[in-house]
Image (spheres, helix red, strand yellow):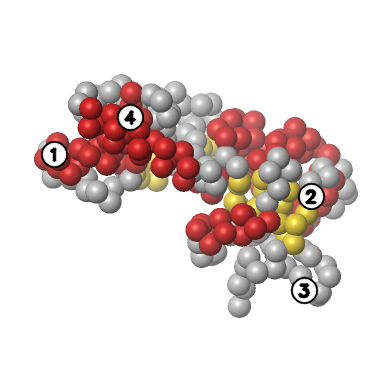
Amino acid sequence: KPEARHKAVGEAEAEAEHGTKHRGDEEEAHQTSDGEEDKSCSDAEPGSDCYAAVLWAQTSGIFEHPEWYKDSDGEALTSESSFRQFQAHLHRHHQEGCTSPCHGPVMSNQKIVLGTLEGSDVVTTVNEEARTKDSWHNSELFASTWAFLTKRVKSIYKHDWIVKVDPDCVFFPDRLRDHLVQHEVQGLAQFFTNCDIPAGTSKLYGALILRAAVASYGGAWQACQKSADWTTIGEDLYLERCMATLHVKKVGDFTLVGDQ
């Protein structure tokens, strides 16, 4: 491998390591339809030949030899293509031992092929225990899904933050990182409340949970289901009560959400 490639890879690795400290909002895992880890996919790990090759392709190869990154079907990568797209390309061409990159799990009570993304099929992860009364009283669905994720998707614990948002939420990760820098306490299990109406109530609508808080939930979620009414409430109230039960630190940040 040419010296220039080693230099480019080293610089890009350092930048990537610095830039991914707060990428918990991009939780990545891939499951088979029965929920077991699918070893046929994996995201390239820093230090591996595949990781180095992808970084070189992203930072040097695409500029020096753009013709290398065109497929027979006419699809071509560009300097704007993602890390996963480059990894998928190397996988398709059997280079550097790259496997197919993984995509985040989409939960369902049945197996459904949703389509393709970056050259790989996206298939729902089956959780047959998923159940709900309606869109508002959804604590059982929320609890069963998170119990499944914390048990089966071990990569969830690699990230600093887990972000829960509603489907109709417009989400700005870069702005969120600014809030985290101001309010997080390293090593402390904590979550954010984001609604203070009426004043002084500090309630939860949506949630941000530190990795340690997710670990607390994964190890003791049964304690959150002892109240008689837990199946009749919404996910937000369920989670807020649960964090209190597990003694997770509550931090109010009432500028997180703009709800008009």
Using the image as rendered, state which of residue 32 and residue 184 is in the foreground: 184
Give the SS element for disc 4.
helix
Can you identify the residue that label 2 sits on?
249
- Which of the 4 image quadrants contains residue 179? bottom right
Q: Position of residue 53 (x, y in %)?
A: 29, 30
C-alpha gap between disc 1 and disc 4: 17 Å
Can you identify the residue that label 4 sits on?
52
Q: Is residue 52 left or right of residue 111?
A: left
Give the vertical position of 42 relative to 232 (above or below).
above
Q: Nearer the viewer, mark 3 or mark 4?
A: 4
C-alpha gap between disc 1 and disc 2: 51 Å
Amino acid under label 1?
Answer: His
Can you identify the residue that label 3 sits on?
197
Using the image as rendered, state which of residue 166 and residue 233 is in the foreground: 166
- Which of the 4 image quadrants contains residue 167? bottom right
Give the SS element for disc 3.
loop
- Whether pointer 1 and pointer 3 mark residues with C-beta atoms closer than 8 Å, the reply is no
Point out the tag, 2 or 4, that comes first from the N-terminus. Answer: 4
C-alpha gap between disc 2 and disc 4: 39 Å
Give the SS element for disc 1.
loop
